[in-house]
Image (cartoon, grey):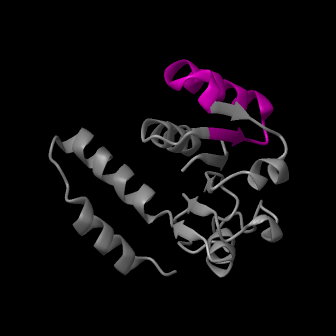
C-alpha cells in the first residue's frame, strides 16, 4: 500500500502503525482525537522510519481522498461503544480496510467497508496474535496461531 490512514494512536494504534511502516507502507497518516497523542506517535516513528513516511492530520476526508488503506484502531465500534467514526460515504471500494476491534467481529465500519467492496481484515488476527505472544511470554512455549485463530473464530459470533 502506498498511503494508509490510521485512526487511533494509543496502544493498538502504535502496534499497527509500527507493523505497517516496518512492512513497507509508503506513507502513514495518523489521526487521533488527541492531537498530542497522534503527534507523539508520528514523531517517534518518524525517527525510526523516516519523517517523510509519517504524518498527522485532523482532516479525515482529505486524508482518505488519497489513501488506499484505512486502519481503524479506536474503541468506537466495540460492543460497549457502538457506532462508527468514519462517515460511510467516505469508505470507497478501492480502500483496503483493517478494524482491530474483535468484539463484535463485524463492526459497523467493517460491514460498511464490505458493502463498499473494500478488501478487509477483522480484528480476530489482532486478538489471536496478542494472545499467542502473551502465552509465549508467560509460559516460554510457542502457541499455534493458526489453531488458536480457528478456535477463536468458532467462539465469536460475527
Q: Quadrant of residue 70?
A: bottom right
Compared to residue 138, the image places residue 142 above or below, namely below
> Is residue 41 at all visible to an observer of this figure?
no
Instruction: State the image coordinates of residue 90 (x, y, percent, origin top left).
Output: 79, 64
Side (left or right) of 137 relative to 114 = left
The answer to whether residue 134 is seen in the rendering is yes
- Is residue 119 rendered to the left or right of residue 131? right
Front residue of 136/42: it is 42
Q: Position of residue 21 (x, y in %)?
A: 50, 37
Q: Residue furthest top?
A: 47
Residue at the spot 68% in from the left edge and 40% down from the top edge? 29
**Count of numbered labels shown in the rendering:** 0
* Figure check: 111 above or below 32: below
Magenta segment's dominant SS is helix
Query: In x, y percent, where is residue 124?
Result: 44, 65
Where does residue 128 sit, x and y in percent of width and height? 36, 59
- Indicate yes or no whether the magenta region holds residue 40: yes
Side of 121 where 53 appears, left or right: right
| Magenta stretch contains residue 132 | no
Q: Residue at x 52, y 42 (%)?
A: 25
- The residue depicted at 50 percent of the width and 21 percent of the height is 48
**What segment is highlighted magenta in the picture?**
28-53
Q: Residue at x 63, y 31 (%)?
A: 54
Amino acid at each position: 500500500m502506498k498511503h494508509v490512514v490510521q485512526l487511533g494512536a494509543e496502544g493498538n494504534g502504535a502496534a499497527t502503525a509500527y507493523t505497517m511502516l516496518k512492512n513497507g507502507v509508503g506513507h502513514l497518516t495518523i489521526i487521533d482525537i488527541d492531537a498530542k497523542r497522534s503527534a507523539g506517535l508520528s514523531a517517534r516513528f518518524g525517527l525510526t522510519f523516516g519523517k517523510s513516511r509519517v504524518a498527522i492530520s485532523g482532516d479525515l476526508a482529505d486524508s482518505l481522498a488519497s489513501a488506499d488503506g484505512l486502519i481503524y484502531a479506536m474503541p468506537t465500534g466495540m460492543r460497549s461503544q457502538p457506532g462508527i467514526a468514519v462517515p460511510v460515504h467516505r469508505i470507497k471500494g478501492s480502500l483496503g480496510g483493517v478494524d482491530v476491534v474483535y468484539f463484535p467481529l463485524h463492526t459497523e465500519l467493517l460491514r460498511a467497508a464490505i458493502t463498499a467492496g473494500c478488501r478487509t481484515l477483522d480484528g480476530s488476527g489482532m486478538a489471536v496474535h496478542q494472545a499467542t505472544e502473551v502465552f509465549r511470554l508467560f509460559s516460554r512455549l510457542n502457541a499455534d496461531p493458526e489453531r488458536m485463530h480457528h478456535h477463536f473464530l468458532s467462539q465469536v459470533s460475527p
